[in-house]
Amino acid sequence: MKLTDEIVIKAPKARVYAALNDPDILQQCIPGCEELTQHSDTELRARVVLKVGPVKAKFSGEVALDKSRAPDHFSLLGQGDGGVAGFAKGGADVTLEEDGEDTLLRYDASAQIGGKLAQLGSRLVQSTAKKLAAKLFKNFAEILDEERVS
């Protein structure tokens, strides 16, 4: 499954990059995120509750960041286990580009799923993944916009 999109964030690139590395901000943005803990500069651990069609699962997983080309570009790889619901693993490449006073954020992500989630059908899973990604970045943009206005 592949997801690509771009969004304009009304904040300078340095602020967007800093916010993308702030576990407290990310936890507020990620739909269903119950816990997000930073173990190092490049490692995070998360617990997220998701509902995909009739399947509701609590995923525990780890994310590793590659910041070698930051702040313009960074990559992440992650995997999560949802018990009987299945597993998910994938990665994303994120690019940040200055657009005047704003920042254009582009992402190209891919994921693999297994277990009950995979049995639901690719259309339902793809649709849910797109909605979750859109909600995450909408939440992210709103938080940074609120900071700017405050």
Image (cartoon, helix red, strand yellow):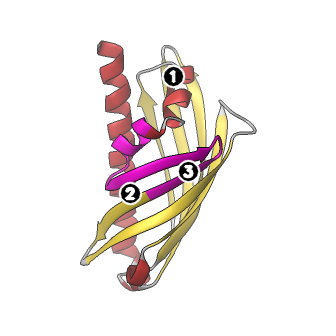
For label 1, the residue is: 15
Residue at the extreme left? 54
Residue 138 placement: quadrant: top left
Q: Nearer the viewer, residue 88 or 120?
A: 88
Q: State the quadrant of the C terminus.
A: top left
Magenta span of residues: 24-46
Q: Where does the image place residue 15, in percent across and percent down from the top left?
A: 51, 22
For label 3, the residue is: 44
Disc with the residue nearer the chain's start (2 vs 3): 3
Determine crowd level at label 2: few under 14, some 14-19, many 20+ residues with C-alpha closer than 10 A.
some
Horizontal relation, residue 58 to residue 68: left or right: left
Horizontal relation, residue 10 to residue 42: left or right: left
Q: Is residue 67 above or below residue 32?
A: above
Mark 1 or 3: the one toward you:
3
Confirm whether the magenta stretch covers residue 112: no
For label 2, the residue is: 130
Q: Nearer the viewer, residue 102 or 54?
A: 54
Residue 32 placement: quadrant: bottom left
Q: Which amino acid lies under the numbered mark 1 shown in the image of this protein?
A: Arg
Q: Where does the image place residue 90, in percent across and percent down from the top left?
A: 57, 63
Horizontal relation, residue 92 to residue 47: left or right: right
